[in-house]
Image (spheres, rainbow, N blue to C red):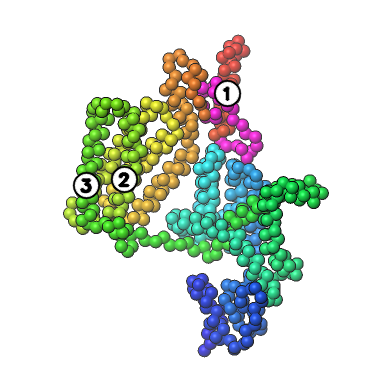
């Protein structure tokens, strides 16, 4: 009986790399060839009936031609759509090109409906308005749709997000893997393996020196204008050498981003760890049934004092101490109370495993969550008072949204305790709530809300808006703030988004209306 000549590919990768001795034991002993100087020990070429000596993963293999063709198509699309431009509307057709190129490498070559819908939904915020949040949704949605399309089985949303994040982080390692790939090609050519034509072997040997020299030359040309002028004089064509090199660097970055999604083998998603398995996380903070009981008693007593003062001064109209205004009282308390509510939610999650140890602990926890919910409501009321006193800003709108999210999070924690759900159940719903809120906020014109609210607040009876001196946002102003408007522009289709296009049309209509009011005889 002989051992198998090929290791089992279902084994983990470390075992595959160390299992080459199985095939070596089945083959007759031969004198080991001396490795090439400066190269790692690698397996010799297979003869007729011979066995492979050495780790099988160290042998040189070209990537599949379909994957290389898809990568080339993505790089060409990036060169035509994204180079030297802000990733605005042009990112949407680029994402579509990457998605179709990835689907073309799949066995069935059919466009999966779910990933396609996810990709379309992730590009909508970028079509609505070009901003950083929209770009983040476009990139993350593209990564998640590619993982979903290549997944072997129906995936869980958390598993798709985790794998997409892993592949995005792995794009940083791609330049180093390309260097390793070139090194393996050189070693394979030295061993006489079939790696292609002689020109391809020569190119593999020159890849690293030429790439290193090119990178060094770019840095020297940027640092020294004299060297840059020398380089420009070497070319008779009207080509800016430094710009050409920067284009190569940009396209290399795009290839590093795309390649992990094309080369991801197997389509197996990582299993999410069970967060409630093992010892409770609060154990490392000294939590137990006794400490949780004492903490809940103390915390509830302290919050009762805080809630009582808020009821007295905010609702009952009690007079504040001398020198303290209601606006200052609201400003000092709003953000601190929201931070307190967030910490309270974390404590409730950590203390949940100990609630069944003693009678009455659940009641104390419900009281704790109810008081923090009241605290969150008081923070929202303080914020509203501060807006009434000093006006609305974008930051204050964000604070109001955060207050609502904190309150909903506390309600979810109470429901989790009531229904005895796991920590993973809670984290999934909190993450989904936050993600849905950010997605909806990407379609809201907060600058218009701020300008409209503050202009309506500053404008008195018959008072022109121009005399108030309020700085209206350039592209998001209401009609009666015409004198402060700076007209937005759309120079090309890449700069187009629905919000700016709608604003330009609105301003044109307002311009016509004002002219007709100034010349009523021309109606």
Q: Earlier in the sequence, mark 2 or mark 3?
A: 3
Secondary structure of the residue carrying numbered label 3 = helix
Residue 34's place in the image compared with 487, above or below, is below
Q: Main secondary structure of the magenta part?
A: loop
Q: Residue furthest left?
A: 359
User: Which residue is painted at 55% across and 39% down in the image?
Assistant: 130
Residue matched to label 3? 298
Q: In the drawing, what numbered circle is on residue 208?
A: none
In this rendering, would 360 be left or right of 48?
left
Q: Quadrant of residue 205?
A: bottom right
Query: Which residue is more in the foreground, 51 or 231?
Result: 231
Query: Which residue is more in the foreground, 161 or 368?
Result: 368
Residue 115 seen: no
Q: Which residues are magenta?
A: 474-498
Q: Earlier in the sequence, mark 1 or mark 2?
A: 2
Secondary structure of the residue carrying numbered label 1 = helix
In this rendering, would 398 be left or right of 211?
left
Q: Residue furthest top?
A: 521
User: Which residue is painted at 57% across and 72% down in the image?
Assistant: 57
User: Which residue is painted at 61% across and 38% down in the image?
Assistant: 495
Q: Quadrant of the C terminus?
A: top right
Q: x%, y% of residue 122?
A: 52, 46
In this rendering, would 204 be left or right of 169?
right
Residue matched to label 1? 509
Q: Residue furthest right?
A: 236
Residue matched to label 2? 410
Answer few, some or many: residues within 10 Å of disc 1's Cα (few below 14, many 20 plus, some between 14 and 19).
few
Q: x%, y% of residue 502?
A: 56, 31
Answer few, some or many: residues within 10 Å of disc 3's Cα (few below 14, many 20 plus, some between 14 and 19).
few
Secondary structure of the residue carrying numbered label 2 = helix
Q: Are marks 3 and 1 in contact (CB under 8 Å)?
A: no
């Amino acid at each position: 009986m002989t051992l198998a000549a090929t290791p089992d590919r279902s084994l983990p990768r470390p075992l595959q790399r160390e299992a080459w001795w199985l095939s070596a034991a089945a083959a007759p002993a031969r004198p080991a060839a001396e490795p090439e100087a400066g190269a790692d020990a690698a397996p010799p070429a297979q003869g007729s009936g011979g066995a492979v000596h050495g780790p099988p993963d160290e042998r040189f293999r070209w990537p599949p031609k379909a994957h290389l063709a898809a990568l080339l198509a993505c790089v060409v699309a990036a060169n035509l759509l994204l180079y030297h431009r802000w990733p605005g509307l042009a990112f949407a057709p680029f994402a579509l090109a990457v998605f179709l190129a990835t689907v073309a490498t799949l066995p069935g070559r059919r466009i999966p409906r779910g990933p396609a819908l996810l990709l379309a939904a992730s590009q909508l915020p970028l079509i609505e308005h070009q901003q950083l949040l929209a770009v983040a949704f476009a990139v993350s949605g593209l990564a998640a749709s590619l993982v979903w399309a290549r997944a072997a089985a129906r995936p869980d949303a958390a598993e798709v997000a985790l794998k997409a994040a892993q592949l995005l982080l792995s794009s940083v390692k791609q330049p180093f893997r390309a260097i390793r790939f070139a090194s393996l090609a050189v070693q394979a050519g030295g061993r006489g393996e079939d790696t292609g034509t002689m020109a391809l072997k020569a190119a593999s040997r020159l890849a690293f020196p030429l790439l290193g020299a090119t990178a060094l030359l770019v840095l020297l040309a940027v640092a020294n204008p004299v060297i840059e002028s020398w380089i420009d004089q070497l070319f008779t064509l009207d080509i800016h050498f430094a710009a050409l090199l920067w284009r190569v660097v940009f396209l290399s970055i795009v290839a590093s981003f795309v390649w992990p999604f094309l080369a991801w083998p197997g389509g197996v998603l990582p299993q999410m760890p069970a967060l409630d398995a093992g010892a409770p996380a609060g154990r490392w903070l000294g939590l137990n049934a006794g400490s949780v009981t004492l903490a809940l008693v103390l915390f509830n007593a302290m919050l009762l004092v805080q809630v009582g003062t808020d009821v007295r001064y905010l609702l009952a109209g009690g007079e504040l101490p001398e020198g303290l205004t209601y606006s200052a009282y609201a400003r000092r308390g709003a953000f601190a109370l929201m931070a307190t509510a967030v910490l309270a939610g974390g404590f409730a999650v950590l203390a949940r495993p100990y609630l069944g140890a003693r009678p009455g602990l659940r009641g104390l926890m419900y009281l704790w969550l109810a008081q923090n919910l009241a605290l969150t409501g008081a923070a929202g009321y303080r914020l509203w008072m501060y807006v009434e006193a000093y006006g609305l800003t974008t930051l204050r709108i964000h604070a109001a949204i955060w207050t609502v999210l904190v309150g909903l999070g506390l309600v979810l924690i109470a429901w989790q305790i009531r229904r005895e759900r796991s920590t993973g159940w809670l984290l999934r719903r909190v993450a989904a709530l936050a993600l849905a809120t950010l997605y909806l906020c990407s379609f809201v014109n907060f600058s218009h809300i701020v300008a409209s609210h503050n202009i309506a607040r500053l404008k008195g009876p018959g008072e022109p808006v121009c005399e108030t001196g309020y700085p209206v946002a350039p592209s998001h102003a209401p009609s009666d703030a015409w004198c402060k408007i700076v007209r937005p522009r759309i120079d090309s289709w890449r700069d187009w988004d629905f919000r700016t296009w709608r604003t330009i049309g609105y301003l044109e209509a307002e311009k016509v209306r004002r002219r007709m009011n100034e010349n009523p005889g021309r109606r």
